[in-house]
Image (spheres, helix red, strand yellow):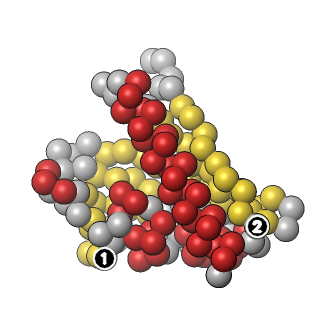
Amino acid sequence: MAADQVEIIHTTINREWREVYEYARQPQNMAHWAAGLAAGLRQEGDEWIGDGGPLGDIRVRFAPPNGFGVIDHDVTLPDGTVVHNALRVVPNGDGAEVMFTLIRQPGMDDAAFAADAAAIRSDLSTLRSLLETE
């Protein structure tokens, strides 16, 4: 089985890494910096539910809080497809490096992959702006 195409998208945030992690890992904060979740998430048991638009709601399950900066989360789309999202916050000097590993999904064309990468870059830029101006 061949590996899928991957792009690691990252940004440096000039704020202590644990503070970045604590803010970014909170599902209720994602509406402020993750455009795809701008409508917000509501908790339902161990999952968070988001507005998936005309196709229906998405379900998101997050990694438990941890000391490693891991904010991985699985998104279940309305059709049942599960997309794993690897999101990490790691120390970088006195600041933090936030990294999202974008994995190309089966059947995704070049334009859709590039659009996903651009959206993630924008989200991480928004996160950086929020945390560096607080």
Q: Where is residue 44 in the image (x, y as percent from the top left)?
A: 26, 75
Q: Quadrant of the N terminus?
A: top left
Q: Can residue 69 be seen in this view?
A: yes
Q: Which of marks 1 and 2 is in front?
A: 2
User: Residue 45 at what x, y percent from top left?
Assistant: 29, 75
Cα separation, mark 1 vs mark 2, equals 30 Å
Residue picked out by circle 1:
43
Q: Mark 2 points at which residue?
A: 14
Q: x and y percent of residue 54 in the render? A: 13, 54
68 or 35: nearer the eye? 35
Question: What's the residue at 17%, 45% (across, down)?
Answer: 79
Q: Is mark 1 on a helix, strand or loop?
A: strand
Residue 107 place in picture, x, y as percent: 30, 25
**In which quarter of the view is residue 93 placed?**
bottom right
Residue 87 vertical placement versus 117 (above, below): below
Which class describes the residues within 10 Å of circle 1: few (<14), some (14-19), or many (20+)? some
In the image, 110: left or right of 76?
right
